[in-house]
Amino acid sequence: MQRRLVLWALIVAMVALPALIVGASDARPQRPVGSEMLHLRFAPVGLADDGVLVSGPYAYVFAGVDHGVATGTLTDDRTGRRRSITSPAGCGATLMGGPWLLFTCQGSVMLHSLAGGAWRPVASLHVPVMYGVVPVAVAVGTSWIEFDATACETAPHCAAAAYVFESIRSGRVRSDPTNATTFADLDSPALARRVCSPLRVPKANVGVEGDAYQWAARPGTIRFYGSSVMANGRFRDGTTGLFLERCGSRLHRYIDTDIYTTPDVAVNVHMVIWQRRHDQLAGLWLPSLRRLVIPLPAAVQATPFGAGNLYGIYLSSSTLYALNEDGQLWKTRPPSR
């Protein structure tokens, strides 16, 4: 009889054990399955109402405009070195790419060397001015400046759309080489660069009616971050938006929908980051695709006056910047993988 009682007690204990384990698991804090939680220390940088520009290890923070002269602070995130930049009269910083900070002036463009600090004037763009619209610089790289000569506001159905490229070195102007297998690489002296197989350059992403008016003629884009590729537009399978892809792979991972409202998504060679909740950032390690979560301290989160999300997120090669709707800029240094 005693042996039967002992055996029965063992059976009851074995049945109850899984229930005890599940209960203990449910009591732990919940997090997205398979995600790495990064508890980072954010430090205040200052006010940056007009946003941030990043390129490689550099970050430029706008300070303001006084009597037609723009000022801002350029930081080298590798060394922490900071320097103030004052623009020529009538010029304002609008783009950063490759080794350049681009200033748009009255009828001209000026380049500021990120490494050396020297100013470089850019030859006037000799292209036809369509419908009275002056071409506007929209991107800059090591070797080329991209100009948008689109006149959507005055031309029917963006019929005058045109993207032209000016060589920084020679001033030579070229038309857009983009097609299904070739894209415009602003860092390449040759400009035209073939896309690695099996990738294709997407077509324009015409989302809502407002986008159709403003972006109907804009081609899709593709950009390399090490072995990873960020492609946005309308793809052959009918998907639209911003997707993560990779050379030699069928990877086609959805990242975001609204590809024209930057910087909802921030990318460097180590990670891609976005915001889905007001109290945290989410993302992926590159190239492993392991998911990550970055909780946002209360001070970094948007104020009660905002809609609950950050105004912008930015990634240099080593530093994450977060700008809240109060105009306060914060920074932190995520680990690299």
Image (cartoon, rainbow, N blue to C red):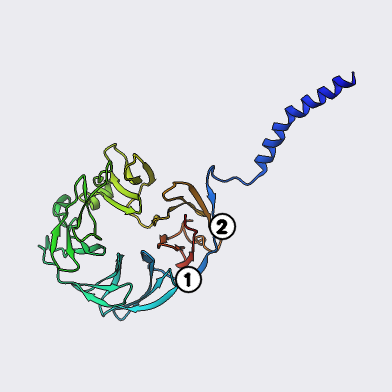
Asked which secondary structure carries label 2, the reply is loop
Q: Residue furthest top?
A: 1
Depicted 229 relative to depicted 320: above or below:
above
2 or 1: mark nearer the eye: 2
Amino acid found under the numbered disc labelled 2: His
Q: Residue at x 69, y 36 (%)?
A: 21
User: Which amino acid is tagged 1?
Assistant: Val
Identify residue for label 2: 39
Residue 145 position, x and y percent, is: 22, 64
Q: Which residue is mark 1?
A: 45
Q: x, y (%) of residue 212?
A: 24, 48
228 or 165, nearer to the observer: 228
Position in image of residue 303 (x %, y %): 51, 62
Q: CA distance from mark 2 to mark 1?
A: 19 Å
Give the mark nearer the N terminus: 2 vs 1: 2
**Which residue is most to the right?**
2
Q: Nearer the viewer, residue 212 or 323?
A: 323
